[in-house]
Amino acid sequence: MQTYRLSATGRRKTLMLLIGALIIWGFALWSFRSTLNISYNPIRFWPTLSAAIEQGLPISQLVPALLMLALIIATPLLIWNLLEEWAARYTPTEEGLRFESLGITLVYPWNAIQAIQRVDADSDEAFDELEFTGDYTRQIANPVLRFLHAQAYGRTRLPIYAGLADRDELLAEIQRRGGGASTLASAT
């Protein structure tokens, strides 16, 4: 059984995106603090935040603060997605396609593959998704990991990353074993 992972180039690109996400998250944390003039000291956080709210926030503070708050919340989810992509491994087995990453192991039966979709046909790098007939994330015992995996991929989809080594070989194997899986030109 061959296991498919990100190529060296794919890992470098993912690492660059990860570094960029960490920089954005740091900037958002710094900007949020300086915009509202609050302290991140655990003892002083709530009093300084309450004081900033009581003083009233003009639109010139409120809009940037809300934008930075959205980045503070969303960026860790992006970082998780990138880390899961970094560690992703696909192994075709007799039972089905095994996906492993960051303590997650899922086996998707071959007959559960409904379609293989090209996500962005106009892109320079091919990116495909497998669509399944049901939710196989219940195989993940840890509810936090299950939530993070589902928010990254959805409950009935699994990406086949653009940076995967021997990606076309894996897709051909999935198509061959998937039987009823139809190949769609692009996702709608």
Image (cartoon, rainbow, N blue to C red):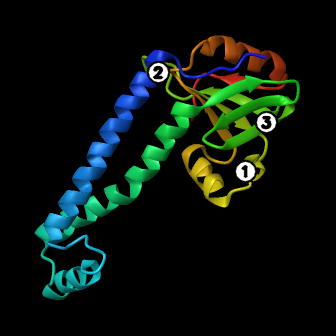
What distance separates the C-alpha of mark 1 from that of mark 3?
12 Å
Crowding at mark 3 (Cα within 10 Å: few <14, some 14-19, many 20+)? many
Snapshot quadrant of residue 104: top right
Image coordinates of residue 122 in percent, x first then y, are 45, 20
Q: Against 45, is 135 above or below? A: above
The crowding category of the residue bearing disc 1, from other C-alpha atoms within 10 Å (few below 14, some 14 to 19, many at least 20), is some
Instruction: Answer left or right for 65 relative to 156.
Output: left
Q: Residue at x 67, y 11 (%)?
A: 169
Residue 123 appears left or right of 188: left
Residue 47 point in image, percent of width and height:
24, 85
Question: Mark 1 touching mark 3, by CB under 8 A?
Answer: no
Q: Position of residue 177 (x, y in %)?
A: 83, 20
Tell me if residue 171 comes above or below residue 22 in the rendering.
above
* Foreground of the two, 30 or 97: 30
Q: Which label is found at residue 140?
A: 1
As helix, strand or loop, the secondary structure at mark 3 comes to: strand
Asked whether, in this view, residue 4 is left or right of residue 164, the answer is: right
Residue at 75 percent across and 15 percent down: it is 173
- Give the quadrant of the N terminus: top right
For disc 3, the marked residue is: 108
Sequence order check: which comes first, mark 1 or mark 3?
Answer: 3
Q: CA distance from mark 3 to mark 2?
A: 24 Å
Point out the residue furthest to the bottom here. 54
Which mark's residue is nearer the viewer, 3 or 2? Answer: 2
Of the residues under marks 3 and 2, which one precedes in the sequence?
A: 2
On-image quarter of the C terminus? top right
Residue type at tag 2: Gly
Q: Residue at x 43, y 45 (%)?
A: 79
Residue 78 in the image, given as x and y percentages of width and height:
44, 46
Front tag of 1 and 3: 1
Look at mark 2 in the image and give the residue it sits on.
Answer: 10
